[in-house]
Image (cartoon, coloured by chain):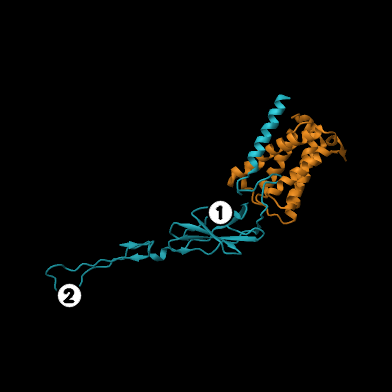
Amino acid sequence: LNFPQVWKDLQYGAAIAAAPFFWGILLLIGYAPAGLSFPLDEPQAFLRFTLIYPVLEELVFRGLIQENFLRASWGKRQIAKVSVANVATSVLFATSHLLFHSPLRAAGVFFPSLIFGYFRDRYGRIVPSICLHVFYNSGYMLFFPGQ
Amino acid sequence: VVDLEAKVIRITLTDGGAGDSDGVINGTIVDPGAPGFDDVAPPGAPTGVAVTVIGNEQVTVKFTAPASDGGSPITGYTVTSSPGGLTATGTASPIVVTGLANGTAYTFTVTATNSAGTSVPSTASTSVTLSAAGGGGCSMGLNNGPADPTLPLLVVAALAYLVRRRRA
């Protein structure tokens, strides 16, 4: 990860800042803050969702799948600076979440998936996406575990 | 024998034995002194009840032990949900409550119990609503839910990607 490049990237900074904004919206619509004790109460579950899943999902979706799609000519095309490979990968990413989540919630992960995929394309590597995914999930699991 | 916890006084009186034919059982009852039964009371109510949703249909309830144990050690705590009246017991904080209904807003109270009885309920926790879709942010799987059958597949695919990157 080229950290200086990433941290000077306003778009990446905006993606990081979007997370607290989203958590604030969840509070406004009635999600109950959980007292910040989930990492201590359930350390295994916390690590599973803040580290293991984000790393594995980025390796598979932004790494294996999105890179394969980018090899195809259609995957390289862009819609509003977002690659079709990214959109297709995000559709798969959201669909995979139907195994566990409601359709609304599964559809909801389409947008963060687009962000992860965007930075995968922007940097040509998946580490920035992994960092974002870890950050997004960590905040969610800290403030709203199980909700 | 005085058993304060069971609130029982067992008294054995002995007659005078052979040759004592007065028909009267002789003995002395002695007040055991403090602590008497009146010195033991139910404990105070637990305080600081906080709830964390830890997954599908279950929460963790944390609380602070009462300042007063009523003169007898606290033997247990009971968490009660509202609505539903589901209870879970334990000897210390935190206590996990299972079997709750997703989509329902719950509050929880805690009582403490000692040999003299049960405390009044604590102040209710803030309301929490459980979700069947409780999970890990942008990731698959559920908190404490059933084992994720996709996890081995994810691991294999991730390893395949890493191997391919190394060979490239």
| Residues flagged by tags 2 and 1 on a common chain | yes
Residue position marked by numbered label 1 in the rendering:
B96
Single out the residue that lies furthest toward the bottom: B23
Q: Position of residue A41 (x, y in %)?
A: 58, 47
Q: Residue at x 82, y 33 (%)?
A: A72
Q: Position of residue A131 (x, y in %)?
A: 72, 36
Chain of the residue that carries numbered disc 1 in the rendered image: B
Q: Which mark is residue B23?
A: 2
The local secondary structure at tag 2 comes to loop
Q: Which mark is residue B139?
A: none
Whether residue A12 is visible, yes or no, is no
Residue type for callout 2? Gly
Q: Position of residue B93 (x, y in %)?
A: 53, 52
Quadrant of image for the C terminus of chain B: top right
User: How crowded is the residue under tag 1: few (<14 C-alpha within 10 Å), some, or many (20+)?
Assistant: some
Among numbered discs 2 and 1, the one appearing first in the sequence: 2
Quadrant of image for the N terminus of chain B: bottom left
Q: Residue at x 71, y 28 (%)?
A: B164
Residue type for callout 1? Val
Residue B99 lies, with reference to residue A136, above or below; the image says below
The chain in cyan: B
Which residue is at the front of the view, B7 or A69?
A69
Residue B59 lies, with reference to residue A6, above or below; the image says below
Q: Residue at x 63, y 39 (%)?
A: B152
| Tint applied to chain A in the drawing | orange
Whether residue B119 is visible, yes or no, is yes
Residue A53 lies, with reference to residue A147, above or below; the image says above
